[in-house]
Image: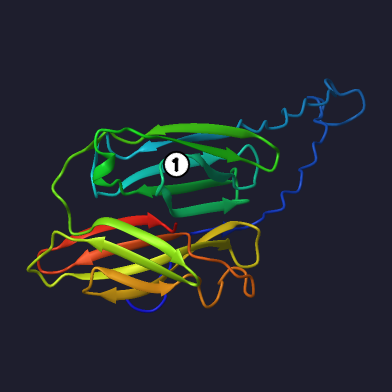
Amino acid sequence: MTGTVKALVCASVCFTLMLPLSSFAQKGSGGGGTGGGGGGTATPPPAPQNPPLQFTGGSTSLTVGSDQPAHVQLTALSDGRDAPVITKVAGPDGLILFNTAPVDHPHGTNGYTTAEYAWTPSRADIGTAPVAVFTATTLSGARATVTVTLGPVVDVPPGAISGLTATLVGDRIQANWSSNATGTSATFSMSGCYHTLLPGTNLPYLFCDHLDSTTALQSNVPASPTVNVGQPGVPVNYYGIFVGASGTVAQGTATANVQ
């Protein structure tokens, strides 16, 4: 991985002004002349009603392996044209946003947002089944909640990446991990992600930068991006570290929030 890596994020911003159509009186069977029959006025159809906020989602697997990423996929359909905002309000340490796609003012339908969160449990989490709580809110004040159980976490052999941690030390992030990929030519690729806004909008946006490629089991990287793509001039730190392993034998991924 080289250069800047953009997360799996898409945001579509399009606003269509829908002009109301005039309702015209319908003539009776007399063809519009004096004395023609009917002459009634058609009843206009009722105004469309916005559906309530709809929020669904859950874990992508029934069990979770230690040192293996687990994913939660969420979808929120707005009660209006604005894209709902999805927020994690509770959950295990290290359950972090992996990607998000808010769609604001789409043509012909309500706004919606999809989001995916990732969590890599450690061996200390074996036997637990932590609960995560997410909320979705809209500009109208509508609010919905989804509760997701992650696990139970089961004991599996250590993977290519195990025990990933990311610690903020001054203006640097120290990442450490271990690996079961001994005797291979494993290369570890690290990315850091930060929250910002979609350029030119108020929509939440997730951007990730490639920070390092190494054969070592640690890396020391900057705590913040050189340029905040969505809000130039606004300082921001990486909130999460994502590490992937590749090699002749080793493959795997892991995530950690920056502590």
Give the x, y percent position of residue 99. Answer: 44, 55
Residue in the picture at 65% in, 41% down: 80
Instruction: Give the residue type at disc 1.
Output: Leu
Residue in the picture at 16% in, 51% down: 158
Quadrant showing the N terminus: bottom left
Which residue in the rendered view is the most extreme toward the top? Answer: 37
Which residue in the rendered view is the most extreme toward the right? Answer: 34
Say which quarter of the image contains residue 126: top left
Q: Which residue is mark 1?
A: 74
Give the x, y percent position of residue 232. Answer: 62, 74
Give the x, y percent position of residue 145. Answer: 53, 32
Using residue 186 as the reference point, say whether residue 231 is left or right of it: right
Give the x, y percent position of residue 201. Answer: 65, 62
Q: Nearer the viewer, residue 34 or 224?
A: 224
Quadrant showing the C terminus: bottom left
10 Å crowding of disc 1: few (<14), some (14-19), many (20+): many
Residue in the picture at 23% in, 73% down: 216
Using residue 164 as the reference point, say whether residue 226 is left or right of it: right
Which residue in the rendered view is the most extreme toward the front? Answer: 169
Q: Nearer the viewer, residue 254 or 231?
A: 254
Residue in the picture at 54% in, 44% down: 87
Q: Nearer the viewer, residue 77 or 242?
A: 242
Vertical side of 243 occupied by 38: above or below: above
